[in-house]
Image: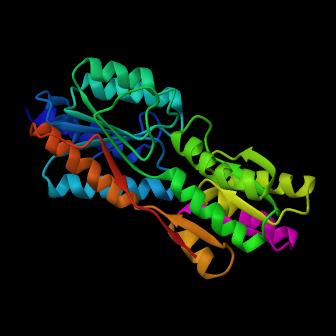
């Protein structure tokens, strides 16, 4: 028994220290998770932990799990849709009671989620939806409204008819789709969209894409980025160009809020990722207790300027 416990602790420690391979973070030890066959474990497949927004979301979930005295397994997909499918299959094999999913790609994740649900596992989608799947609960900000709010403010700053650029998130992600929709609802009517390019929610890519856009068209007056990481990348590119370009992001990360305060960004849309994580765990606990939960739980947004 002592040897078994030592080996289990070593395995759990290896999972925590090595972020390669399965990239798993557990609140409880690996031994407890594997023995949790009664369905009282919550599994959480997060799109990436290389983004402050999702780190905060995960921290909110972990805090709520501790407060509710439930076991939680968090697995990082590393922004890899194929890996997320494998992660979900692994969580299902562990017989988790509830599966929380934050999709890398809202289309690509659908088959794995459908399979989990067909095996009786309840599924909660958080921040991003699962396309074509009627999950048990969806917890998210109104991304369309938030993007519309951001674009309306950008228009106030640059003037109607001005040229603007859009930095898009990961293709296929519901946040990309919804924020793009909100942006175009305003921009297509009142602004000139000179460029719409993907930067995959990544700061370095945001800088590179923005540099390329500026080389192609130096008359751009504003930028809407689907998240703050890309917006902050655009800030670097704009600073290097010496131009006065208004940049609005989405997520209200700490870095972005500081950039707004310092005048480097015009605004960001504030979500509450910690609240999303807490709500997801609270909802999962209710589901495991046999309680009825709302199909959709919205989390409010606001403009920080």
Applied colour scheme: rainbow
Residue depicted at 39% across the width and 26% down the height: 133
Residue 213, relative to residue 94: is it above or below? below
Q: Quadrant of the C terminus?
A: bottom right
Left or right of residue 270, residue 187 in this image: right
- How many discs mark residues in the rendered view? 0
Corner quadrant of residue 245? bottom right
Judged left or right of residue 180, residue 275 is: left
Q: Tell whether 217 sits left or right of 225.
A: right
- Can you give x and y, in whole percent of width and height, for residue 162 in the image? 82, 63
Residue drawn 41% across the image and 34% down it = 22
Q: Which residue ends up furthest to the bottom in the rendered image?
A: 262
Quadrant occupied by the N terminus:
top left
Q: Position of residue 126 (x, y in %)?
A: 38, 44
Q: Is residue 239 above or below residue 225?
A: below
Q: Name the residue rendered at 14%, 27% in the picture.
A: 37
Q: Position of residue 186 (x, y in %)?
A: 67, 55
Q: Is residue 241 magenta?
A: yes
Look at 21% across and 52% down and name the residue there.
Answer: 65
Percent x, y for residue 293? 20, 42
Q: Is residue 111 magenta?
A: no
Res. 138 visible in picture? yes
Q: Which residues are magenta?
A: 234-251
Judge from the rendering whether residue 59 lies leftward or rightward of residue 169; answer left or right. Answer: left
Write down the quadrant of residue 122 in the picture: top left
Residue closest to the eye, 24 or 145: 145
Can residue 28 be seen here? The reply is: no
Look at the picture and state if 67 lies above or below 100.
below
């Amino acid at each position: 028994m002592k040897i078994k416990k030592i080996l289990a602790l070593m395995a759990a420690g290896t999972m925590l220290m090595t972020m390669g391979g399965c990239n798993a973070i557990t609140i409880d030890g690996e031994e407890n998770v594997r023995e949790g066959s009664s369905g009282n474990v919550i599994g959480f497949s997060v799109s990436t932990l290389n983004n402050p927004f999702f780190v905060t979301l995960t921290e909110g979930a972990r805090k709520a799990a501790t407060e509710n005295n439930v076991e939680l397994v968090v697995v990082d997909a590393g922004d890899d849709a194929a890996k997320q499918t494998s992660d979900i299959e692994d969580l299902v094999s562990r017989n988790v009671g509830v599966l929380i999913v934050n999709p890398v790609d809202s289309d690509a994740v659908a088959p794995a989620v459908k399979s989990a649900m067909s095996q009786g596992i309840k599924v909660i989608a958080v921040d991003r939806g699962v396309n074509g799947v009627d999950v048990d609960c969806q917890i998210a900000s109104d991304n369309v409204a938030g993007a519309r709010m951001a674009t309306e403010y950008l228009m106030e700053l640059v003037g109607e008819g001005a040229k603007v650029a859009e930095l898009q998130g990961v293709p296929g992600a519901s946040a990309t789709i919804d924020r793009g929709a909100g942006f175009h609802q305003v921009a297509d009517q009142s602004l000139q969209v000179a460029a719409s390019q993907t930067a995959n929610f990544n700061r370095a890519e945001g800088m590179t894409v923005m540099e390329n856009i500026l080389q192609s068209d130096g008359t751009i007056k504003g930028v809407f980025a689907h998240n703050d990481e890309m917006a902050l990348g655009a800030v670097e590119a704009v600073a290097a160009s010496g131009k006065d370009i208004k940049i609005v992001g989405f997520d209200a990360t700490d870095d972005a809020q500081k950039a707004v305060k310092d005048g480097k960004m015009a605004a960001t849309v504030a979500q509450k990722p910690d609240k999303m994580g807490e709500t997801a765990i609270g909802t999962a606990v209710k589901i495991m207790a046999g309680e009825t939960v709302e199909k959709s739980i919205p989390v409010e947004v606001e403009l920080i300027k």
